[in-house]
Amino acid sequence: MFNFEISAHCPHTKGRCGCFHTPHGPVQTPRFMPVGTLATVKGISTEQLARTGAQMVLSNTYHLHLQPGEQVVAEAGGLHRFMGWDGPMLTDSGGFQVFSLGKLNKIDERGVVFRNPRDGRTIDMTPEHATNIQMSLGADVAMAFDQCPPYPATENDVKDACRRTHAWLERCVNAHTRTDQALFGIVQGGCFPHLRRESARAVAAFDLPGIAIGGVSVGEPTDDMHRIVRDIGPLLPQDRPRYLMGIGTLREMAVAVANGIDLFDCVLPTRLGRHGTALVGGERWNLRNARFRNDHTPLDPTCSCLACTSHSRAYIHHLIRSDELLGLTLLSLHNITHLVRFTNAMAQAIQEGCFSEDFAPWQEDSPAHHTW
Amino acid sequence: MFNFEISAHCPHTKGRCGCFHTPHGPVQTPRFMPVGTLATVKGISTEQLARTGAQMVLSNTYHLHLQPGEQVVAEAGGLHRFMGWDGPMLTDSGGFQVFSLGKLNKIDERGVVFRNPRDGRTIDMTPEHATNIQMSLGADVAMAFDQCPPYPATENDVKDACRRTHAWLERCVNAHTRTDQALFGIVQGGCFPHLRRESARAVAAFDLPGIAIGGVSVGEPTDDMHRIVRDIGPLLPQDRPRYLMGIGTLREMAVAVANGIDLFDCVLPTRLGRHGTALVGGERWNLRNARFRNDHTPLDPTCSCLACTSHSRAYIHHLIRSDELLGLTLLSLHNITHLVRFTNAMAQAIQEGCFSEDFAPWQEDSPAHHTW
């Protein structure tokens, strides 16, 4: 269980493709994972989700703890049964959300006390608690409870957060007892290269079945993020899946794959879909735009999703203009399919030895005009 | 084309079951038709719709004329191609909506002038115009442009509306030239039995491929509606499909089928779904209710819809509580399936000679406790 087989390496970059085995099936990497915050990928049925090519789906511990509560999910037989998704799943630890969404009351070595914005209730979250909740939820992969410092933060604050993250990781490892669930550690360190390297070594020392880079996509300049990935990617254990948290833009995924990253997640495709925006090639199209009114061609003729095979740009434009739910569903489906296809295409290029050639343009500044 | 074959009669009531043939396939009757106002059944993909058992889908001429406009739909190759639904379709004439939704400016023998609430534009709607729009939309069945008097209305007003409806029907018949589209006439007459009978005879005289009872479900007492159906059903041509417009509650459909009605439509199942309500047996359940929080059984174990086969009451409760779109989609799917199944069950009972026995309870006042 939780074997990671690497089937090919790119000869010119650190890119690799492989297969991560979980109790609910394989995850071919590199791969984009859609986010189902509250045990549902917004607006999409699990049947529809399966046809996007997504294999592993993410869900949020923080949100599920607040609603419906992990007991309800456990009673149902776990997250897979609760939401009707039989494929691989991953839960984040809630660390990011506690620090970004909760009304933080107190943070110390023991853990975090924060206020539930829904009902004002005070919640006490420790590494043990976050781990127990995730064991109750029962995803294939659980994430360690970390402290994600905001951007910008002082070196001292980031150092503190790293120290805490590493101490908490040990407590998560000790609390975690499910053998049918992998625990991944998370590298922090903000934009400080030496702290990132230190964190990578500290987390790698735990010899976990997978490892993540957290604390990116929190507002730092894109160049800093690329630097972190270039710097840290190669320091992580070669034989374990590497997951870059919260990233789902084409350029960033291409840069990350070239530096040995395997897994990605992002709310972007569904959030853009709900705002009427489609990802086509490297561009973002606002389907509300009048230029689509009489455009009876498929959204993206190269895409095999429901929106592109059964409907036209004019129809989706009409749905978005009319505030029809189906418009949001179709665009979300398309956008997820687009990102999954992009990571699939990178995997295939690595297999065929043409990754560095085919995907070099995507690592540059303005890849909007590129196709694949 | 547009043949209507009756395959069985109930020996004790006027109920019958049959098959109405259209260019896009057969419609087995009695049958409930879901409403796709703006060329989409709210929140449901056409693939999902097909699996509800719905065969014929309704769309609204008034709404489609305003957005996206019938030219766009015609350019796409008609309504079927535009929305990606290859089964039978019916468009209403817009008469009901012009009188109930539009800001009416003028009504005379020629037609209706009203203001488009979206952009304030003045629109001139005549029987010829309504027929031309429907020919552009290209559904299998078009409806005549009628005047639907509000409830309550004086006998004189209803008499005027009937006279106009009959004169307009003749103009619709003359304007209608598509041979791959059936035109149905509409019986009006409010709650005045003699006007209803007169209207039934006047509309029947046009010898159209189908006939509808309009102007019900406009606020009149249920008993009046039942009386109209009992009175008028038998006066309509035996060998043509009969369509009771705007009705989709179990009791009313059972009463109507017992009086020889074949087709129904109603926005109720999707509207209730969007408000978190499920139709189960003869009851309406609010899935937001806390009693479903830990209920891990299927919504309706007798139902084969996606919501009932893949998910639990607790999960749907969680989705509704979390304002997740999927909750609305699942409940809308279930509610449509429920009404289609109910009309299917009536058809089967007629076939098997047990309709009057099995469905008599549904024609009584409180059928909430009945199952089928």
Image (cartoon, coloured by chain):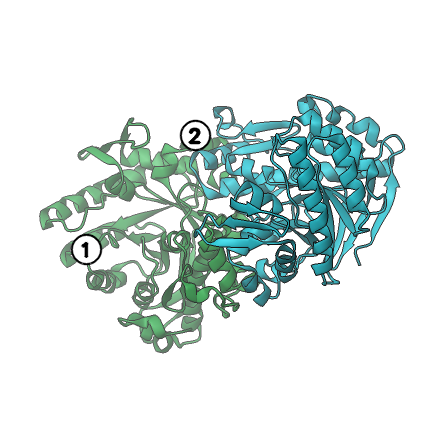
Chain colours: A cyan, B green
Mark 2: which secondary structure? helix
Nearest the viewer among A7 and A291 is: A7
Q: For the residue carrying disc 1, how many other residues have a C-alpha within 10 Å: few (<14), some (14-19), or many (20+)?
A: many
The C terminus of chain B - image quarter: bottom left
Residue at position x 67%, y 40% in the image:
A160
Rendered location of residue B273, percent (x, y)? 41, 54
Furthest toward the right, the residue is: A11
CA distance separating discs 1 and 2: 36 Å
Residue type, numbered disc 1:
Arg
Q: Nearer the viewer, mark 1 or mark 2?
A: 2
Give the mark nearer the N terminus: 1 vs 2.
Answer: 2
Determine which residue is flagged by label 1.
B196
Q: Is residue A241 left or right of residue A74?
A: right
Is residue A332 depicted above or below B68 in this figure?
below
Rendered location of residue A77, percent (x, y)? 61, 66
Query: Which subunit holds the residue at mark 2?
Result: B
Mark 1 on the same chain as mark 2: yes
Mark 1: which secondary structure? helix
Determine which residue is flagged by label 2.
B71
Rendered location of residue A60, percent (x, y)? 59, 50
Nearest the viewer among A74 and A204 is: A204
